[in-house]
Image (cartoon, rainbow, N blue to C red):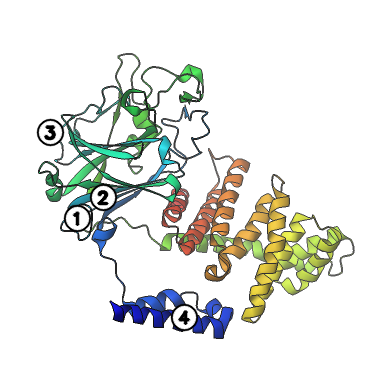
Amino acid sequence: MNKLKSCLNYLLLAVTFVVCILGIPFFFYNSDFLSTLLSNSLHLKITPSYIGGEIAEDFFDNANDDNGSGILRYPSNSEFNEGSLDLVRYTVHKPVYEAKWQQNAEYWQLDLEYRSGPAEVKNIMVYIDIDNGKQGSTETLEEGAENVTFTEEHPWDFAIHICNGKGKVYNSKKEFLCNTELSILKDGKQLLVRIPLQKKELQKIYTSKKTYHYVLTSGYSEWDRGNILPIEKRRTVSRGGVTESSEYNSLVPKIYDILDDSSEKKFSQQMQLSSFNKEDFTKATLYPIEVTMNESNFKKQNDDLAKEIISKCTSNQKAHDEQNKLLYEDANKNPITLEEKLNFAVLAFDVGETDKAEPLLAEVVKEQPENYLALAYYGSCVATRGGNSSVVQAVKLVNDSYIYLDKAVELSENKPEEIDVLMSRASVSKAVPNAVFGKAITGAEDFTKCANLYKKQIDMENPTEEQKLFLAYLYASASECYKTAGKETEQMISLKEAEKLWK
């Protein structure tokens, strides 16, 4: 132990020496220096059993579908943040045994991640069929609580009820089996559920090759049946509601989000939660997602997809670039008015003549300090100049560029050119080293906001191929920024949005 401590002290001293002597320029060029140095020097490796076990399968659910079959509304209670009942990721680990230094040496972990917190408003039910329908229940744990039934092909064997900071496991006879270990992370966005496997009844999970999961998210209510928040015609502080009172009936499922298999359209969330029948009082029937347990079948999104979409959009842009070049050649090279200078500068920037665009933009910004379009393009020019400078100068120029870019974004909110301005900052944020400037998240958020704004400008019911490609480009670019920032869940959500448009 003393030897390891001595090595660590020496390593940290060496890192401090490098930073003091070489300073920012070294780290600007070597953004992965520290992590590489640590891993190569210490050969650190985390045993999977410490962090939940190896992953069996990972599922990414559609974001912004936290409205049940499309009609539910959150209670007006301010604790229900936007997206707090919107499941976006569900991770199933392989069962673990003989884990060292853990509360339970044998356990099975499930991870749930939501678009936002807090955890206190969530009521989560996970129903699991482990024997492929040989026995089990098709009714909910608490009779009538969620207002749904389950398909007869996959009755559930175990139910996990998560709410109020606790998790409990039941069998299909509704007998309590055990408490779970529950960890709540990321300000209530992420819940890690560890199910102890000491009981023989639960140890069947070790031999299950496939399991089938129903993952249901409702609002939490302390006093109502199953701790599930009721749904009424109109939402109140303590009750959920529907978008139109005429859409309400007593069979509406009290579920805001389910994990569905989006590749099977007949089993989409909207279809499942709308499958009740008012005429014969039949409840909605839910279908599970299939999980491969003990084989290496971890679903990985194709990292090349984002690059492929961006490349396609860039290729399509070439025709537009050629048109801009012709306009630039014919343009007046000696603009006089501020409007003429701005128009020519934008055109010069678009064809790569930033050295001609920057001084004209500087004049416009000086005379019109709140001209957000000029600020955005001028900020981009300053950042571009940083790419051709020494490292120390580049750091200063990029930081200076955000003074103009941030101001432009603030001034352009709800203005016609808002997308243009956001795209300027997003492009710079995607290009600069994140290890130095930490702007990848800004880029991701700007690209995503551009996508949301663009959707409002086009007919999303019947978009053209060109419009779909541009939207896919925005989501793919956001995905790449999230990846750079180490936000895997957000990366996959954006990539999924891009993929839907790309198909």
User: What's the CA distance linking mark 4 and mark 1?
Assistant: 37 Å
- Residue 257 lies, with reference to residue 114, above or below; the image says above
Q: Which mark is residue 15?
A: 4
Q: Position of residue 301 (x, y in %)?
A: 37, 57
Q: Which residue is mark 2?
A: 109
At mark 4, the secondary structure is: helix
Q: Which residue is mark 1?
A: 96
| Earlier sequence position, callout 4 versus callout 2 | 4
Residue type at the position of mark 4:
Val
The answer to whether mark 2 and mark 1 are in CB contact below 8 A is: yes
At mark 2, the secondary structure is: strand
Q: Which residue is mark 3?
A: 135
At mark 3, the secondary structure is: loop
| Earlier sequence position, callout 4 versus callout 1 | 4
Q: Which mark is residue 239?
A: none
The answer to whether mark 3 and mark 2 are in CB contact below 8 A is: no
Q: Position of residue 191 (x, y in %)?
A: 35, 46
Residue 87, located in which quarter of the rendered image? top left
The answer to whether mark 4 and mark 1 are in CB contact below 8 A is: no
Q: Nearer the viewer, mark 3 or mark 1?
A: 1
